[in-house]
Image (cartoon, grey):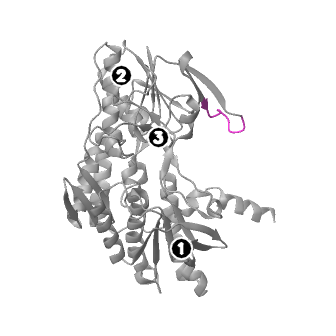
């Protein structure tokens, strides 16, 4: 009996952990497929970008905590449900070679490839936009922001200085709101070390096409967060879209035009496009249609959860569960228990969970929260945010490392050194080679 799990994010990791704990080795073989050998704990990505947490500590190595699971680095490229076979494309052993396709037969399949950024055809976005969905992008963005401060403090060109100190974030969801708040907090501190730059010189703009930021939360949380950001001189423009980026000039739908050297795209995510190619039932958003037990409709052996699954929310009839980490982690456990139940001929259970609230960190000692209808803000919300996510962080090892990062950050000064050269490690060597040839 082989159980194949596609995706090593929140759902894939927690489901594999649960299956590893509940199944005996002779009951089933577990195989997990993902392009990366680690899971990224997304709720702490903004803190990693701001330097509050070491980026290495917000990733969880899959092989270390899943010793009974075969981890295959690759991506699902084709699925043949009738034949119970999945085709996985794996990277070549040598860089110059082409990718290879491997076939995996399975008895039960768990589909949780997650989501990908939702990219819109905005002129200039591909050339000038910066993403914020991975650890690599978070580190790159941190280096970029600090580099702009260095540039602004070194130039006498007023136009260049203004563009360097203007930071535009498009998308007011959890990712965009958390990123702009944490990075503004970091940059405000870093500005003290740059002669001639005052915190008021920095121009931060959050652009949201909807009528409020944090649409995943209760309206009160979004309004309170907006007030908090505006109180820190961060412009929050709701009901506004990015129209174009040409020659470093950002154009918004409200008629605004301004020069900016930083444009961060965090305008939501969509279900992984591979799901539409599986031949399974999908909704208009490309998510797999599931019943309340997390089984994909029209199948008996395919399960799904997380961002790529349209799971009915039994606490809100007629609606689907929101694509949040709260649901993903809990769905993973119910899914794993139902897979075990199917293997053992036991009845499955339905997924039912009513959200207890929402938490958002907005920088050091700043945050907003809504907990069981009660609104919190400031240091209390910030401490609660850290406590909740420390508890949810997988493995004791990662909990200890993150806690140590937070304690050291509270005792010592911020690290505000740009390490942009890490993104081009061969640049210095290549320059020396060119000088020697001359």
The residue range painted magenta reads: 89-97
**Mark 3 Cα within 10 Å, few/some/many (few <14, many 20+)?**
many
Q: Tell me the quarter of the picture where residue 292 sits.
A: top left
**Mark 2 Cα within 10 Å, few/some/many (few <14, many 20+)?**
many
Residue at 68% across / 39% down in the picture? 95
Quadrant (top left, top right, bottom left, bottom right) of the N terminus: top left
Q: Which mark is residue 101?
A: none
Tell me the SS state at disc 2.
helix
The residue at which mark 3 appears reads as 114
Query: Residue 15, relative to residue 141: is it above or below?
Result: above
Nearer to me, 387 or 438: 387
Q: Mark 1 vs mark 2: give the one in front.
A: 2
Nearer to me, 287 or 80: 287
**Mark 1 Cα within 10 Å, few/some/many (few <14, many 20+)?**
many
The residue at which mark 2 appears reads as 339
Q: Are marks 3 and 1 in contact (CB under 8 Å)?
A: no
Q: Main secondary structure of the magenta part?
A: loop
Q: Tell me the quarter of the picture where residue 397 sits.
A: top left
Tell me the SS state at disc 1.
helix
Question: How much space separates mark 3 and mark 2, taking CA atoms?
Answer: 19 Å
Q: Are marks 1 and 2 in contact (CB under 8 Å)?
A: no
Q: Which mark is residue 148?
A: 1
Query: Residue 151, relative to residue 81: is it above or below?
Result: below
Q: Please tell me which of labels 3 and 1 falls first in the chain.
A: 3
């Amino acid at each position: 009996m082989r159980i194949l799990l596609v995706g090593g994010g929140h759902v894939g990791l927690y489901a594999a952990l649960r299956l590893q704990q509940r199944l005996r080795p002779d009951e089933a073989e577990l195989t997990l497929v993902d392009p990366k050998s680690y899971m990224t704990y997304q709720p702490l990505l903004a803190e990693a970008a701001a330097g509050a947490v070491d980026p290495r500590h917000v990733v969880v190595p899959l092989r270390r905590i899943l010793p009974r699971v075969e981890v295959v680095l690759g991506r699902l490229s084709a699925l043949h449900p009738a034949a119970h076979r999945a085709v996985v494309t794996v990277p070549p052993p040598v860089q110059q070679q082409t990718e290879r396709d491997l076939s995996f037969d399975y008895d039960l399949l768990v589909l949780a490839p997650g989501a990908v950024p939702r990219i819109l055809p905005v002129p200039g976005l591909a050339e000038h936009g910066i993403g914020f969905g991975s650890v690599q992008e978070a580190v790159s963005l941190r280096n970029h922001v600090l580099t702009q401060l260095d540039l602004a403090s070194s130039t006498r060109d007023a136009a260049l200085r203004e563009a360097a100190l203007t930071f535009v974030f498009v998308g007011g969801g959890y990712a965009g709101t958390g990123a702009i708040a944490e990075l503004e907090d970091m940059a405000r501190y870093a500005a003290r070390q740059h002669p001639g730059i005052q915190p008021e010189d920095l121009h931060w703009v959050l652009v949201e096409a909807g009528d409020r930021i944090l649409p995943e939360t209760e309206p009160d949380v979004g309004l309170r967060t907006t007030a908090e950001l505006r109180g820190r001189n961060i412009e929050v423009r709701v009901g506004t879209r990015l129209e174009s980026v040409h020659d470093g000039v950002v154009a918004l739908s409200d008629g605004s035009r301004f020069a900016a050297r930083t444009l961060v795209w965090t305008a939501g995510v969509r279900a992984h496009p591979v799901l539409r190619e599986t031949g399974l039932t999908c909704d208009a958003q490309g998510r797999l249609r599931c019943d309340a037990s997390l089984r994909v409709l029209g199948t008996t052996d395919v399960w799904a959860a997380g961002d790529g699954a349209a799971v009915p929310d039994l606490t809100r009839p007629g609606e689907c569960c929101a694509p949040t980490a709260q649901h993903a982690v809990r769905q993973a456990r119910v899914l794993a228990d139902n897979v075990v139940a199917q293997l053992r001929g036991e009845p499955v259970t339905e997924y039912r969970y009513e959200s207890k609230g929402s938490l958002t960190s907005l920088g050091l000692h700043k945050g907003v929260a809504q907990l069981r209808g009660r609104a919190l803000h400031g240091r209390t919300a910030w401490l609660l945010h850290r406590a909740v996510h420390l508890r949810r962080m997988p493995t004791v090892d990662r909990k200890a490392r993150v806690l140590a990062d937070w304690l050291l950050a509270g005792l010592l000064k911020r690290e505000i050194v740009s390490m942009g050269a890490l993104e081009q490690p061969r640049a210095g060597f290549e320059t020396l080679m060119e000088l020697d040839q001359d």
